[in-house]
């Protein structure tokens, strides 16, 4: 399931982030790439230990905790500290699959990357190209969202970023280990949650809502890994 999550960051947060990012020191993006993806990757990144990345990463992680849509769709167990990239004109990232396991810097922790996330930090009209292209079982999706919006998609998907031909594409990217490893099961739980919330708004007194909520939690209990 590929899902856009609007307004993860406010316009003020995006502006503050861009102010810091536009003054930051960027390095070659191959630092976080595996062997195959390093061949395909041409962009710049903030070093993982950069104080700007840590500050902005904390802002993003707090925003995610407040996003009920993100929590419902991702059922997050662990979120990788957000990274930041910048594609200037001529830069792109060819087709690749993200590494399955990532070491969280400065900790003994590893996360399994069930979901990949891209949080856009440049307005679409400020650059040409730079679409995120994700291939899944339902076809090819091109994603280019407003600054502050985020997309999540199964990290198992082949994806690429098309060449930027004008301006610069600035984004945060990171991964989520979900309590529900299987994308199909996670999508079912999300559909059920969305339906229950809609019923709760439209027919709030209906006794079946309690039963459906029980089904949701009992499926979560059966499938969740912690
Ligand atoms: Ni990737």
Image (spheres, helix red, strand yellow):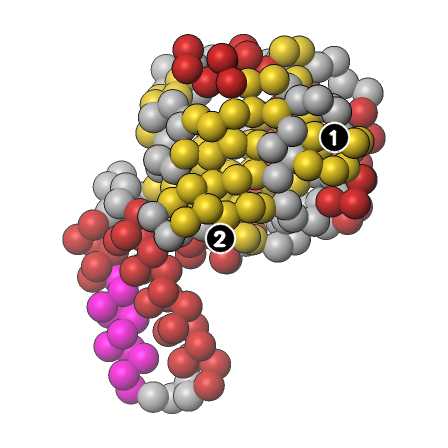
Q: Determine contact: label 1, label 2, CB under 8 Å.
A: no
Residue 62 visible in this rendered orientation of the protein: yes
For the C terminus, the quadrant is top left
Q: Is residue 222 left or right of residue 129?
A: left
**Mark 1 near ligand 1 (CB under 8 Å)?**
no
Using the image, tell me which numbered label, if any, was put on residue 165.
Answer: 1
Residue 213 lies, with reference to residue 116, above or below; the image says below
Residue 191 within the magenta-colored segment of the rendering = no
The residue sitting at 21% across, 59% down in the picture is 219
Residue located 80% across and 25% down the image: 22
Question: Along the line of sight, which residue is nearer the eye, 178 or 163?
Answer: 163
Residue segment shown in magenta: 207-217
Nearer to the camera, 105 or 160? 160
**In which quarter of the view is residue 82 placed?**
top right
Q: Secondary structure at mark 1?
A: strand
Residue 130 lies in quadrant? top right
- Residue 107 is drawn in which quadrant? top left
Residue name at image x 68 percent, y 25 percent: 87
* Numbered disc total: 2
* 16 lies left or right of 79: right
Where's residue 214, x and y in %? 24, 69
Q: Residue at x 50, y 57 (%)?
A: 68
> Badge 1: few (under 14), some or many (20 or more) residues near its Cα, within 10 Å?
some
Badge 2 is on which residue? 3
Say what secondary structure mark 2 lies in.
strand
Q: Toward the viewer: 113 or 81?
A: 113
Q: How dense is the environment of label 2, judged by Cα within 10 Å: few (below 14), some, or many (20 and up)?
A: some
Q: Earlier in the sequence, mark 1 or mark 2?
A: 2
Task: Decide if residue 134 is on the left or right side of residue 179.
Answer: right
């Amino acid at each position: 399931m590929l899902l856009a999550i609007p307004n993860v960051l406010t316009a003020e947060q995006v502006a503050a982030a861009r102010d810091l990012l536009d003054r930051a020191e960027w390095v070659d993006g191959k630092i976080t790439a595996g062997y195959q993806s390093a061949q395909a990757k041409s962009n710049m990144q903030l070093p993982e230990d950069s104080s700007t990345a840590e500050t902005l990463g904390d802002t993003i992680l707090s925003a995610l905790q407040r996003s009920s849509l993100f929590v419902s769709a991702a059922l997050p167990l662990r979120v990788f500290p957000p990274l930041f990239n910048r594609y200037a004109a001529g830069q792109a990232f060819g087709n690749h699959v993200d590494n399955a396991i990532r070491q969280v810097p400065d900790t003994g922790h590893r996360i399994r990357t069930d979901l990949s996330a891209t949080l856009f930090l440049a307005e679409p009209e400020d650059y040409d190209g730079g679409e995120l292209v994700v291939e899944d079982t339902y076809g090819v999706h091109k994603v280019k969202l407003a600054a502050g919006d985020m997309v999540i998609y199964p990290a198992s998907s082949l994806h690429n970023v098309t060449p930027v031909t004008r301006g610069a594409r600035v984004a945060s990217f990171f991964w989520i280990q979900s309590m529900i490893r299987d994308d199909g099961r996670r999508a079912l739980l999300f559909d059920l949650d969305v339906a229950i919330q809609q019923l709760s708004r439209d027919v709030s007194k209906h006794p079946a809502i309690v039963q459906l909520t029980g089904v949701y939690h009992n499926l979560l209990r059966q499938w969740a890994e912690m």
